[in-house]
Image (cartoon, grey):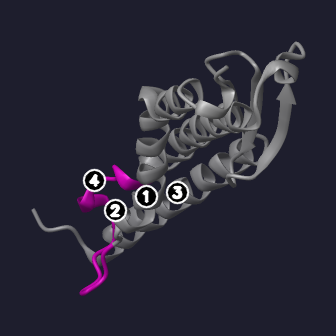
Amino acid sequence: MTESMQERLDRARAHLEQTQKAVADAKAHLSTASATVRSRDRSVEVTVNAQGHLGEVKFLDGKYRNMGATQLAASVLEASREAHAQMARTVMDAFRPFSDTPRDLLPRSEGVDTDWEGIFGPLMDTVRRGAAARGGASDHLRDEITEDPERKG
């Protein structure tokens, strides 16, 4: 059974309207979305918005007073990287329905294709960096702090 041009246009229009509504909903959700993460040592809390901007940094319970500059910086970076990674996952989840759209629902245009890897690639890098930071990137820095000869003796 062959679909008429009018039926294809009607189906494409309906899909476009659904997509426009979904994009507006995703945009509204992301306009107020943020991720807040505490460092593992519980000394720092960082909030990042959907655009990746650092919104707030809190130093908790006065722990920073007993920390060296390098150790405090490591805690800030750890929390910041994880907050960015969480926000990147939230943004990718918000736009996943558009990347998962079945190709037969989209209007066909010769030579036109959406490069979702190009769009989401930077966010995937952020997610990977956040996971690596949680996995011990700051542990290495903390180890160096512990072994710092200036702090000995």
* Residue 153 percent location from the top left of the image: 67, 19
Q: Position of residue 144 (x, y in %)?
A: 52, 32
In the picture of the structure, the residue carrying the numbered disc 3 is 19
- Give the CA distance from mark 2 to mark 3: 20 Å
Residue 8: horizontal and vertical position, in percent?
32, 69
| Distance Cα–Cα, label 4 vs label 2 | 16 Å
Q: Which residues are magenta?
A: 98-113
Which residue position is annotated with label 2? 117
The type of residue carrying mark 4 is: Pro
Foreground of the two, 148 or 77: 148
Tag 1, which secondary structure?
Answer: helix
Q: Which residue is mark 4?
A: 102
**Vertical placement of residue 102 versus 153, above or below:** below
Residue 120, numbered circle: 1
Look at the picture and state if 9 lies above or below 83.
below
Give the mark nearest the N terminus, 1 or 4: 4
